[in-house]
Amino acid sequence: MEQSAQQARQLDSAPAGGASPFAAFGLPGFNGPGPSPAPEPRPILELEGEEYEDELDGLGDWVDDFLLPVYGAEVTTAAPWCARWQEHDGVVAWLHALWLAYQQHKDPEAGLAGMFVWHRDFLIHAMAVVRAPGGPLSACMTSPDRPTHRLLPGPPPSARTEKTTATDPAPGTPDEHDERVS
């Protein structure tokens, strides 16, 4: 009986108007505002300025404090590494994606198998790509006794881009269509 009386008091104390009848119980209403969703993560290479620097700092902490001590196997020619990995955009992109997946899969909502899925579907593949013998760090440190860092040049622009640039008329120059029309 006491419990019923307490529930009645809670219902009676709920604010009138547009407020949720469930507010007295700490619950949102069916049509009321729920918890605000977390901001959608963006790929780190799309960020700029301070936003990029802040994200890179967080990523660096995770890589240095967690990823490398646990999963950073010995540096060899088959698994190179670079102490200046933050300067390799491709590596930053891969590790950031791995970090976002880690955050998602360690969340309790990911279930008991969340971390297994992260290991199987994300960690193994990302580390294999980043540390591949011919990968983005292949010109860097392959021996802990000889620390090195070198950014490999990217491929040149595609032939399509070069062809389009070469065939575009210079600004102010009439093209064939303009000559036929006049």
Image: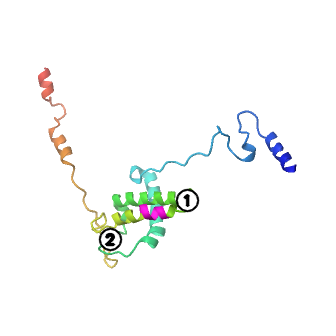
**Residue that sits furthest to the top in the current view:** 182
| Depth check, front residue: 49 or 33 | 33
Considering only vertical position in the picture, is 169 above or below 137? above
- Between 108 and 163, the residue placed more toward the observer is 108
The amino acid at mark 2 is Pro
x and y, in percent, of residue 146 in the image: 31, 77
The verdict on residue 151 being magenta is no
Residue hosting label 2: 80
Give me the residue at 72% from left, 42% from top.
Answer: 22
Q: Is residue 64 above or below residue 7?
A: below
Q: Is 157 left or right of 88, judged from the image as shown? A: left
Q: Is residue 104 visible?
A: yes
Closer to viewer: mark 2 or mark 1: 1
Quadrant, the C terminus: top left
The percent position of residue 1, horizontal first and vertical second, equals: 87, 49
Q: Quadrant of residue 135?
A: bottom left
The local crowd at label 1, few if under 14, some if 14 to 19, many if 20 or more residues have their Cα within 10 Å, is: few
Where are the magenta residues, as a range? 116-122
